[in-house]
């Protein structure tokens, strides 16, 4: 039996705000479907050159009151990054809260505007511990 990974789907409340968050992570829009009859949009975003590792954002044009309040039933998305300190600084500079800072030079967690937990992992070996990250406390849930 064959199986192939297709994508991870997350529901979003504000498509443009969510798209901007994933762009801060370095993802780009690779595909979009707008359904006039269904009144929804599907926007697929992937790391450049990795279209087979997509996040599908589903946006219902008329809102989605059925979304859980914290979306924790989902789990998280995970991405490896070239420099965990640089990406965390870039996200902070753009107003994103670092929920679990990369104190160990290896792992951090942030949340999307729709409360989706995103794990960032350092490619290869952990970086040497650095301030302010090494002594930074967790913020909220991750």
Image (cartoon, rainbow, N blue to C red):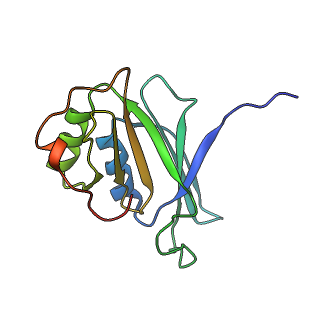
Q: In this view, does 57 lie above or below 132?
A: below
Q: In this view, does 40 lie to the left or right of 121?
A: right
Where does the image place residue 107, in percent across and percent down from the top left? Answer: 35, 39
Q: At 18% across and 51% down in the image, what residue appears? A: 136
Q: At 48% across and 75% down in the image, what residue appears? A: 69
Where does the image place residue 125, in percent across and percent down from the top left? Answer: 35, 21
Q: At 42% across and 63% down in the image, what residue appears? A: 114
Q: Quadrant of the C terminus?
A: bottom left
Q: Is residue 46 above or below residue 61?
A: above
Where does the image place residue 113, in percent across and percent down from the top left? Answer: 36, 61
Q: In which quarter of the image is residue 41?
A: bottom right
Q: Is residue 117 left or right of residue 6?
A: left
Q: At 58% across and 51% down in the image, what residue appears? A: 9
Given residues 10 and 107, the one toward you in this image is 107
Given residues 89 and 37, the one toward you in this image is 89
Given residues 33 and 87, the one toward you in this image is 87
Q: Is residue 121 left or right of residue 98?
A: right
Q: How many marks?
A: 0
Which residue is situated farthest in the left direction here?
131
Q: Is residue 74 above or below residue 21?
A: below
Given residues 87 and 105, the one toward you in this image is 105
Q: Is residue 70 left or right of residue 85?
A: right
Which residue is situated farthest in the right direction here?
1
Q: Quadrant of residue 27?
A: top left
Where does the image place residue 44, in percent across and percent down from the top left? Answer: 52, 43
Q: In which quarter of the image is the N terminus?
A: top right
């Amino acid at each position: 039996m064959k199986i192939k990974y297709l994508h991870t789907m997350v529901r979003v409340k504000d498509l443009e705000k969510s798209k901007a968050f994933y762009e801060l992570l370095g993802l780009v829009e690779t595909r979009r479907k707008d359904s006039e009859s269904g009144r929804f949009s599907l926007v697929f975003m992937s790391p450049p050159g990795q279209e087979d590792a997509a996040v599908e954002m589903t946006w219902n044009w008329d809102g989605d009151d059925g979304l859980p309040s914290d979306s924790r039933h989902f789990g998280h998305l995970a991405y490896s990054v070239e420099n965990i300190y640089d990406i965390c600084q870039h996200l902070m500079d753009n107003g994103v809260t670092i929920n679990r800072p990369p104190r160990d030079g290896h792992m951090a967690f942030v949340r999307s505007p729709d409360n989706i937990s995103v794990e960032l992992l350092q490619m290869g070996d952990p970086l040497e511990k650095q301030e302010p990250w090494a002594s930074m406390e967790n913020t909220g849930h991750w």
